[in-house]
Amino acid sequence: MALASLALVRPFAPALTPPRPTPRFDRAALAGRLVELSGAANAATLTAAVGLVADSQRHEEPVAWVLGRADPFFAPDVASNGVDLEALVVVRAGQAAVAALAADRLVRSGAFGLVVLDLGAHAVVPMPLQSRLVKLAQQHDTAVVFLTHKRQELPSLSSLISLRAEARLVRARDGSGFRCEVHVLKDKRCGPGQVHAEPCLAAPGLG
């Protein structure tokens, strides 16, 4: 009598989904992306941005800071937060649209790991410029960070922003110092809700 053949059936295994990348807020995590870092009352926008500059310089990544507003940052405060001012390229553009044009040139050169556009309040960057910056940032592995002054409920510069975060300055409960908290409001890669915090000097000129 012929024996019936037995089919080997693999036990059901659910499809494995690749793990999401561990959320970080440093130059390497922001490379190839357009980022908007904003804040209003009790903001620490400049403090968080200067932290990114210091991180980039520690990893030997050249940095350019483009001023798209009238008020410059206070250089001694920047230096006290670990930034080498002699290695920092500063461009005074004066207006947001002009700052974006300058950033286009800087990122296109492929020479910078981080380009910061300090735009202040009511900043408008034309969509064609943002589209070019996205492509250039991806091509040259550059982090492009817009600094804006606005409340978190206000919209970001555009849908091309890959990550939007609000920086806040928080005093330690024991009064011993401050910490800079970066609250992620939008992140196309990892989703919103992360909070990145680190101690900071919180010098008066770094709001």
Image (cartoon, grey):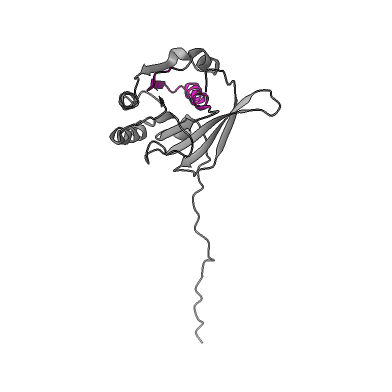
The residue at the point 46 percent across, 37 percent down is 164
Image coords of residue 176 (percent x, y): 68, 23
> Where 201 sits versus 123, above or below?
above
Image coords of residue 195 (percent x, y): 56, 37
> Where 60 sits versus 126, above or below?
above
The residue at the point 38 percent across, 24 percent down is 112
- Farthest residue toward the right? 174
Image coords of residue 13 (percent x, y): 53, 62
Q: What stretch is highlighted in magenta?
A: 44-72
Instruction: Give whichever of 126, 27 is nearer the camera.
Output: 126
The residue at the point 49 percent across, 37 percent down is 152
Residue 161 falls left or right of residue 195: left
> Where 79 sits versus 26, above or below?
above
Instruction: Give whichever of 34, 138 is nearer the camera.
Output: 34
Q: Image quarter for residue 81?
A: top right
The mark total stands at 0
Residue 39 falls left or right of residue 34: right
